[in-house]
Amino acid sequence: MREASDGALAVEVDGVVKNFGRIRALDGVQLAVRQGEVFGLLGPNGSGKTTLIRCMVGLVVPDAGTVTVLGRRLPDLGVLSRVGYMTQAAALYPDLSVLENLRFFAAISGGDRHVNEALEFVELADRRHSVVATLSGGMRTRASLACAIVHRPELLLLDEPTVGIDPLLRAQLWGRFREMTESGTTIIVSSHVMDEAARCDRLGLILFGRLLAEGSVAELLSIARTDRLEDAFLKLSQVESR
Amino acid sequence: MNAHRVLAITRRLLQQFRRDRRTLGLLFGAPLVILGLLYFLFRGSGPNPAIGVVNLDQGPLGAAVASRLEASSGVDNGRLDADTAAARLKDGRLAGYVVLPADFSLSAARDGVIRPQIHVEGSQPGQSAAVVQAVSRALAGTAASQLGSSGIRAPVVEPAVSYLYGGPSLDTLDYFGGAFVGLVVFFLVFVITCVSFLRERSQGTLERLMASPLRRVEIVVGYMLGFTLLALAQAVEVIVFALAVLKIHNSGNVLLIFGIETLLALAAVNLGIFLSMFARTEFQAVQFIPLVIAPQLLLSGIVFPVSSEPGWMQAISNVLPLTYAANGLHDVMLKGADLGWSAIQLDIGVVLAFCLLAVVAAAATLRRRVA
């Protein structure tokens, strides 16, 4: 377990409420993510993970509460050049090559100096001229990650990045995420896979748009008085629904 | 063939449509709107073309024919002198005028032939025909009753028709070609923009753009520039094809035609982006074609002149951007209009204003519409 570098916060979510019609997607979420850590948002499908991440990039404007990212209170377009966002599905231009996609996303985020590094990082340098439509699912995910990090963001938001990815590539991607935090990047990753959650420095358990618990894996296990993260999640969600 | 399985497909199809209100609306609403518009265009009583009378004849027949013409239903403009009539024809207040020459009575008595000179504006073939027809009908009736009662046999009417613009050497394509050049560019650019922008949303990349430092207006203007470059290349191709290969008549400046085409393409790009915000699927985007294109085809004066529409319909025509672009192209190609004409300045100004409005509207709608 790494300690956060200086205790500064990368993201601070304060009392965020978001309704979509009659459905309350976020119900007063309170969350603090420290700089340089891998923070996992853990919860079942439809629990509000994606909405919370979209709040952090200004795609969703909360009905109440505030979101502060890298010291800037949203909405703030300027801070987005320091944030990388990888959407759930690999959102790329299928009729462009990997390199053309990367160059585009680099240009709109400010500068294309790191295109080659990003390609090397996701091991797609030899497929740089391949049109995205011809790539396999795993390659597309890697290309999508490359597009999210090509501008060297200080904060990287990953929305279920390893869904539909084979275990080998999953392990490889987590290795990459770890490398990035070692160079100071903060990563927030959403998942509903428990073994992935165990790789995070700290976790937030989210259910019905509310944060049930927040802490390191060890802390969550001791709160729930169990030794399996899965059981901890089930126990904590039962407390909530009572 | 298994009836059960076939019916399962039929039922599923109808169930899907039941939830797609917009498609149902289009399926059952659009035909009524389009046919209704056609009804008013063909049967609606627009104002008669304004026709003036210039009587230069000293004899009795001229005065009689002139007063009959003025009284007839097709002629609703009073007696004029030749200069005023010519000026009004040029500024569009008259669709045509008839001159009864100085030897009108003499020629009728001596040769049994009357030769009125009919001057028509000429840039609308339907209108020219209506003027000639109205005048001939009034003349024939009048001359027959006038002369028949005095015992002289009815004279032959041999009108001499002269055209301010165009003329008998032009064919239908010459008259309609200019406006259709505009319509083709508008239509294709609109469809391509609308669908491409929608794809940005359906493939998820718009979400990425919106999570980047890009401003909304930067996205819209970037799109506009890209599609405008394509549209300009298309406009060059269309104009060259129309003028050099199809030999559509042009009395104006080719650069001005290109300029109007460019503005029209800009308007189509921005309208496409704006309307794509209101479609969730490419299927729904394609449905904008009958909604956007069909009324403009009917009401923009491309086929039916706006001046011949009923008043309420003219009000609709006057807010459609294509009306102004088609009118501009028509004026340039048939009348040789240039930038000094106030009509051309108005046309260009309105299309330009529409472009700006659509950019602002597209940028304003973008935020709320990220999938």
Image: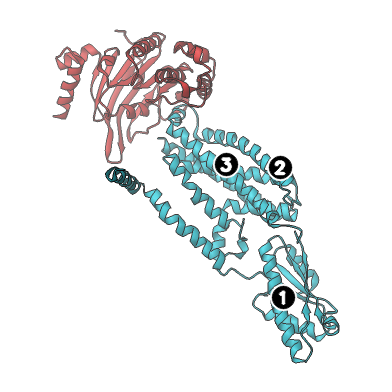
Chain colours: A red, B cyan
Q: Mark 3 is on which residue type?
A: Val
**C-alpha separation, residue under disc 1 versus residue under disc 2:** 40 Å
Tell me the tag on residue B136: 1
Disc 3 designates what residue? B189
Task: Name the residue rendered at 67%, 79% in the picture.
Answer: B72
The answer for which chain carries disc 3 is: B
Q: Mark 2 is on which residue type?
A: Val
Query: How many numbered marks are there?
Result: 3
The answer for which chain carries disc 2 is: B
The residue positioned farthest toward the front in the image shown: B1
B205 is higher (above) or lower (below) than B20: above
**Helix, strand or loop status at disc 2:** helix
| Closer-to-camera residue (A45/B161) | B161
Q: In the rendered structure, which disc, 3 or 1, sits on the residue that comes first in sequence?
A: 1
**Helix, strand or loop status at disc 1:** helix
Task: Name the residue rendered at 58%, 51% in the picture.
Answer: B321
**C-alpha separation, residue under disc 3 versus residue under disc 2:** 18 Å
Quadrant the N terminus of chain B occupies: top left
- Residue A165: which quarter of the image? top left
Q: Residues within 10 Å of mark 1 (few under 14, many from 20)?
A: some
- Say whether marks 3 and 1 touch (CB < 8 Å): no
Tell me the tag on residue B240: 2
- Say whether marks 3 and 2 touch (CB < 8 Å): no
- Residue B34, horizontal then vertical, whole percent: 49, 58
Dot in front, 3 or 2: 2
A174 is higher (above) or lower (below) than B222: above
Is residue A174 visible to us here?
yes
Report the side of B235 relative to B196 (left or right): right
Report the side of B201 relative to A212 (left or right): right
- Residue B230, horizontal then vertical, whole percent: 61, 36
Quadrant the C terminus of chain B occupies: top left
**C-alpha separation, residue under disc 3 versus residue under disc 1:** 45 Å
